[in-house]
Image (cartoon, rainbow, N blue to C red):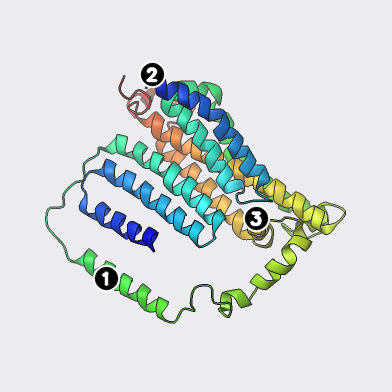
Amino acid sequence: MRHHLVVRVVSKLLIPFILLFGLYVQFHGDFGPGGGFQAGVIFAAAFVLYTLVYGLDNAKRIIPEKYIRAGVALGVLIFGGTGVASLLMGGNYLDYSVLAAEAPKGQHLGIFVVEFGVGLTVASVMIVIFFAFAGRDHKIDEMEE
Amino acid sequence: MAVLSFMVLTVFLIIRLHNLFAIVMLSGIYSLLAATFFVVVDGVDVAFTEAAVGAGISTVLMLGALSLCGRREKVPDQKTWLPLLVVLVTGATLVYGTLDMPNYGDPQAPVHQHVAPRYIEKSLEETSVPNMVTAVLASYRGYDTLGEVTVIFTAGIGVMVLLSRLRLGRRKEDEDVG
């Protein structure tokens, strides 16, 4: 899509806002609708848009695939690790109450960290899956060239 | 009601059409309508997920799959009645199952009598998270969410292994073939 000037310019304008909205949904999920799952998908959508417009090679230059692959596992590790942390601090597995001095604060902290893990894994998996599809055949990133 | 009838209409269009590109687009529209329906019944978080995953990412992934396998549906050689029978029986069973379900929004329904009141009354106090859905998902039902994330993780690993050409040293030679 290298010749589509309008698409290129508009998506260049949109991508920062999509990323920002993803972050908002991620970190505001405690207060409004949203959470790690939705945020991860929105965040990944920005990268999908970038890949569609600028091609797979450019996208891979921005976020090398090995970092995304690490992100896939890291998110689950953060989630599971929060559980282990609460175990070590004397609570049950995934019982966040022990993570801070007061139980509600600990719960809030735990939910925040866990949602981050969810977001990280979901975003990384979506990007990895899309890259796998796009890298399979060069029709997608070099369409209409 | 209008949203639901549009959903039914979309499904019939999907059945009738043979152009896979149009079908993928229509299934995206179907997801968007489903998201609208969830907003109407006040399930904002679910609507959000449906719009982002169903209408957004999965449409893109389906298009990616289409670019690999062509955009025309293969017409089956002969008509078989077994699929229709399976669909009818399953549909009839589902409708039969709804017959003794409580009315929508009935406060006496068992689902509103079990743990829901506790979540509604105590979740803010216990977790200091104003969004009840987030509190339930991440804390009260933390195990389930961990399981879900593991499912996504496994799916990602599966696609990576099957589709992407992982650069493992010894595979270097036959990379061009695959």
Q: Position of residue A22 (x, y in %)?
A: 59, 39
Mark seen at residue B134: 3
- Callout 3 crowding tier (Cα within 10 Å): few <14, some 14–19, many ≥20: many
Tell me, yes or no, whether the two marked residues, 2 and 3, touch with CB atoms within 8 Å: no
The chain to which mark 2 is attached is: A
Question: What residue is rendered at 21% in x and 41% in y?
Answer: B72
Indicate the amino acid at tag 3. Answer: Thr
Q: In which quarter of the image is residue B10?
A: bottom left
Q: Is B157 left or right of A111, judged from the image as shown?
A: left
- Please say if B109 is above or below B153: below
Question: What residue is rendered at 40% in x and 35% in y?
Answer: A133
The residue labelled by disc 2 is A2
Label 3: element kind: helix
The chain to which mark 1 is attached is: B
The residue labelled by disc 1 is B88
Q: Which image quarter holds the C terminus of chain B?
A: top left
Question: What residue is rendered at 57% in x and 40% in y?
Answer: A72
Q: Which of marks 3 and 1 is nearer the N terminus?
A: 1
**Label 3, label 1: how many angstroms apart (C-alpha)?**
38 Å
Q: Which image quarter holds the N terminus of chain B?
A: bottom left
Q: Nearer the viewer, residue A142 or A26?
A: A26
Indicate the amino acid at tag 2. Answer: Arg
The chain to which mark 3 is attached is: B
Q: In which quarter of the image is residue A39?
A: top right
Q: Position of residue A138 (x, y in %)?
A: 35, 26
- Callout 2 crowding tier (Cα within 10 Å): few <14, some 14–19, many ≥20: some
- Please say if B166 is above or below A145: below
Q: Position of residue B128 (x, y in %)?
A: 77, 56
